[in-house]
Image (cartoon, helix red, strand yellow):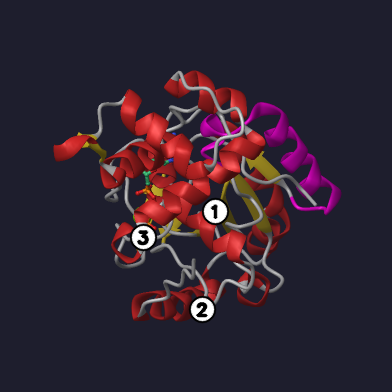
Amino acid sequence: MNINWYPGHMKKTKESIEKNLSLVDVVFELLDARIPYSSQNPIIDSIVQDKPRVVILNKSDLADNNANNLWQNHFTNRGIPSILFDSLSGKGVDRILKIASDVTKKKRESYKDRGVINRPVRAIIIGIPNVGKSTLINTLSGRKGTRTGNKPGITKATQWIKIKGSLELLDTPGILWPKFEEEIVGLNLAFTGAIKDEILDTETLALKLIDVLIDIAPELLKDRYSIELQDLSPLEVMESIGNRRGCIIKGGEIDYTKTSNIILDEFRKGIIGNITLELPK
Ligand SMILES: Nc1nc2c(ncn2[C@@H]2O[C@H](COP(=O)(O)OP(=O)(O)OP(=O)(O)O)[C@@H](O)[C@H]2O)c(=O)[nH]1
Ligand SMILES: [Mg+2]
């Protein structure tokens, strides 16, 4: 399955991020805790250069707890500060503010030495579509200053939002990159909802997801849909799920589209379980 989604507005956003970078003190890089490798933009290093950077592993409430810890260790071992976060509950906001203050300490002191007072710390939030950038900003600011939604491509333009404690955050539209070198990266992004559904073949995608789940989370799959897996193929598993859920069209045939949508939707919402799709290499 060949997935590519790099519309013109993403290229423009990338250019706008590069332009705004000189204004910011710290970069918050939001990754999806279920796919920290696949959600990391390979061109990020060249964009961010030597700005202080903090990785926020968002949607950690949907990911596996052990895997969350492995990923956090992975970033710690590479000297990159990281935070496990869940923008919806907002638990741990203080840690984000503290890290932002720590990594910008030198910069703030240099301002003070030069007599600049009351200059806020400015941060830019970057990440793939739908990872929760705008939700994080709303949680930090305590108000709905920027629109959010459960599909990719909600934020259309960059926008500064003031946060209490003299922090200013720049919300940006989600960006991907021109080509996914590994097929699994494109699939992981599509499974988790970072690629707009209109360009996806949802039935093929759901079959690929079943294939992955049979491998990494067979018990959760069995429990959620009360099915047996034995040696069933992904297609047979989809048919069992369709039957269970009454996704049947005229003539008794399985409604594959409806079944596929249920599986993708329930995976994305964490209803099948807390599942991390990849571990540190
Ligand atoms: N479970 C869970 N859902 C989250 C979390 N953060 C955001 N969401 C949901 O994910 C969806 C996307 O959130 P947004 O904040 O709009 O994502 P975004 O990164 O700004 O997306 P774009 O503007 O399209 O790039 C929304 O439905 C949020 O409610 C989280 O930590 N956990
Ligand atoms: Mg947004």
Residue 241 visible: yes
Q: Give amino acid for label 3.
A: Asp
Residue hosting label 2: 178
Q: Is residue 47 left or right of residue 174?
A: right
Which residue carries the number 3 mark? 201
For marks 1 and 2, give the one nearer the viewer: 1
Q: Note whether 53 is above or below 256 in the view shown.
A: below
Percent coordinates x, y for residue 44 in the rendering = 62, 70
Q: Residue drawn 41% across and 74% down?
A: 10
Q: Earlier in the sequence, mark 2 or mark 3?
A: 2
Residue under label 1, please give it. 188
Magenta range:
58-80
Q: CA distance from mark 3 to mark 1?
A: 14 Å
**Which is nearer the eye, 227 or 272?**
227
Tell me if 86 is positioned left or right of 37 in this view: left
Q: Amino acid at mark 2?
A: Pro
Quadrant of the rendered image containing residue 96: top right
Q: Is-magenta flag for residue 70?
A: yes
Local SS, label 3? loop
Residue 134 belongs to magenta span:
no
Residues at marks 1 and 2, CA–CA distance in whole angstroms: 16 Å
Q: Earlier in the sequence, mark 1 or mark 2?
A: 2
What label does residue 84 carry, if any? none
Residue at 36% over, 77% down: 7
